[in-house]
Amino acid sequence: MSAKYTSSRGTAPRFRQVIVCILAAVLSLAGALPVLGDAPPGLPCSFWGTVTLDRANVPGGTIVTAWINGVQHAETAAFANAGQSVYTINVPADDPHTGGVIEGGADGDAIVFKVGGSTADQTGTWQGGTSSELDLSAVTVIAFTPTPTATPTPSATPTQTPTRSITPTPSATSPPVVQSRTYQHGVDGYWGVTDTHIDAWDPTRNYASEGKLTVRQGGVRSALIHFDLGDFPTVHQVIEAKLSMYVYDASAARPMRASLYTLHRPWVATQATWLRASDAEMWGAAGAESVSDDLSAEAVDGVELSSTRTWYHFDVTQAVGHWLAHPETNYGLIIKGYSNASVQYRLFSSDWIRADLRPKLVIVYEGGSAEPTPAPTLSPTVTTTPTAMPTFTLPPTPGPTATPGSTVTPTPRPNVTPTSSPVVQSRTYQHGVDSYWGVTDTHIDAWDPARNYASEGKLIVRQGGVRSALIRFDLGDFPTGHQVIEAKLSMYVYDASTARPMRASLYTLHRPWVATQATWLRASDAEMWGAAGAESVSDDLSAEVVDGVELSSIRTWYHFDVTQAVGQWLAHPETNYGLIIKGYSNASVQYRLFSSDWVRADLRPKLVILYC
């Protein structure tokens, strides 16, 4: 829902008069500010109205925040007026004269509101100097209430050392245990995945037994998938849920956007076609295209597919949280493809012969508690003792295959007693945050081969390897004796030379380099690269790509999976020479990313490691 300028319902007249007076004063003061630079700061964009959470008034003092492009730009506290909870918020303008620092909104920016941490159903559009009435409502989708007859009794958990900060300190009490649960068909006795795809070119055919799911641009072929979550333990809070799909091949070397939507009606994997959800029921529109009847209006998440024989990951946290809070709504997901080119991608399904390559849903959640034990104090000079890399082995041959053909109809979760799992923890490395100063980075430039760029504040990556970025995280204080579950490198893209996509690929570096000395020709003052531009395979960089993503937007984060690289570095610290980011495109284009020296610490490169 977009903001509306007038409304005859909801808010009490007295509140409306108060807000109008307040906003008039704010805008008057804003207009009277002295000119400090080339131009005065822009006028804010203001919103006001009622605010509810789970269809009820919120307590006074509940925080309401406004976000643009994933960054919070305004905050206010709700208060009571005439029996309603209400708010007013001023979202500041971006100042174009501050050299790239983004302080607020620009005309046309979409504004997302959060109520006490839950995203509101309504959004606004930033327009300087305006005041709009917008009633906000949000739903808590990841806070679960136990059924009346359930009395979960967690079994004893092993003694753990929860570590949530760079320098652990002894604690008398333990935080709630962060655990994870993985759902993958045929693994650990789980047989709850059903999937298929539907095809506009063969509208009466069912593809459930194919072993692969096909997604084609323009919604011509779409994939359906459902995970049975009936055994998920109650009284837990979901922190993150990630759906991982393995792409096997593509019809052409062209990118395609894969977008996920929640499904709104039951379907049968062995009966679903382009026209029918099951033998007994048609789709609301062919291809499950009816918004609200068949699928959600908003995408759950989307990723750019551009490579084969690799995993892609979708953030389904809110969808999973909603399904667990309201099991009757879990009809699964549909994956649709969008591209300007003719292309399709095939993904392995739940029937693929190798269980480890089937679709996988990993839910990280919080609940229960660990035994309180003092955590060791780590000194800043701790050297990581090599530990074994996570081993990925094929599961044992599965038992009898689950009988196909079951209808995807949500079933309530039974009242189960949660079993203990290893404590899953996370550690974040970001230069200048939480006293961590271990990132070094720069970029190298074929057009200026003797120049060093370490003090630029931005990293430039240009197609054809003309400009490449180097980055390294010091992991010397990472606790020993742990297994890495996932490691993610996040980079913030500031701008691009043209509106053209570029593939950014990560490789591990194989020689030491000095950020303040590295150039196109030299790794340091003392050592040359094996080949100019760090192009020598094995001497300078790895032959295989660690991960790659398609860059196509600016003022946004991009995420790289660096799990295996981080695992290797922690097992063999002497090999941690960091990463090089190279660009590939058929067009002339470059992207600039914020470096570890950027003025805002929250936009610097960030490495997050999940481990147990």
Image: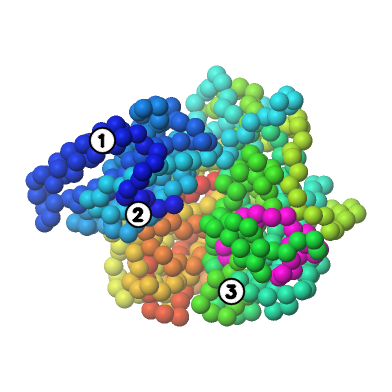
Which amino acid lies under the numbered mark 2 shown in the image of this protein?
Thr
Q: Position of residue 381 (x, y in %)?
A: 46, 38
Q: Which residues are magenta?
A: 258-278
Residue under pointer 1: 17
Q: Nearer the viewer, residue 437 or 426?
A: 426
Q: Residue at x 56, y 27 (%)?
A: 175
Q: Position of residue 229 (x, y in %)?
A: 72, 45
Q: Position of residue 506 (x, y in %)?
A: 50, 64
Residue under pointer 3: 217
Residue under pointer 2: 125
Question: 243 left or right of 576?
Answer: right
Q: Residue at x 59, y 51 (%)?
A: 316
- The Cα–Cα distance between marks 3 and 2, rounded to whole angstroms, is 30 Å
Secondary-structure class at tag 3: loop
For the residues bearing labels 3 and 1, Cβ distance under 8 angstroms: no
Which amino acid lies under the numbered mark 1 shown in the image of this protein?
Gln
Say whether residue 551 is visible.
yes
Secondary-structure class at tag 2: strand
Q: Quadrant of residue 82?
A: top left
* Structural crowding at the residue carrying mark 3, measured as other residues with C-alpha within 10 Å and reported as few (<14), some (14–19) or many (≥20): many
* Structural crowding at the residue carrying mark 2, measured as other residues with C-alpha within 10 Å and reported as few (<14), some (14–19) or many (≥20): some
Question: 610 left or right of 515?
Answer: right
Number of numbered callouts drawn? 3
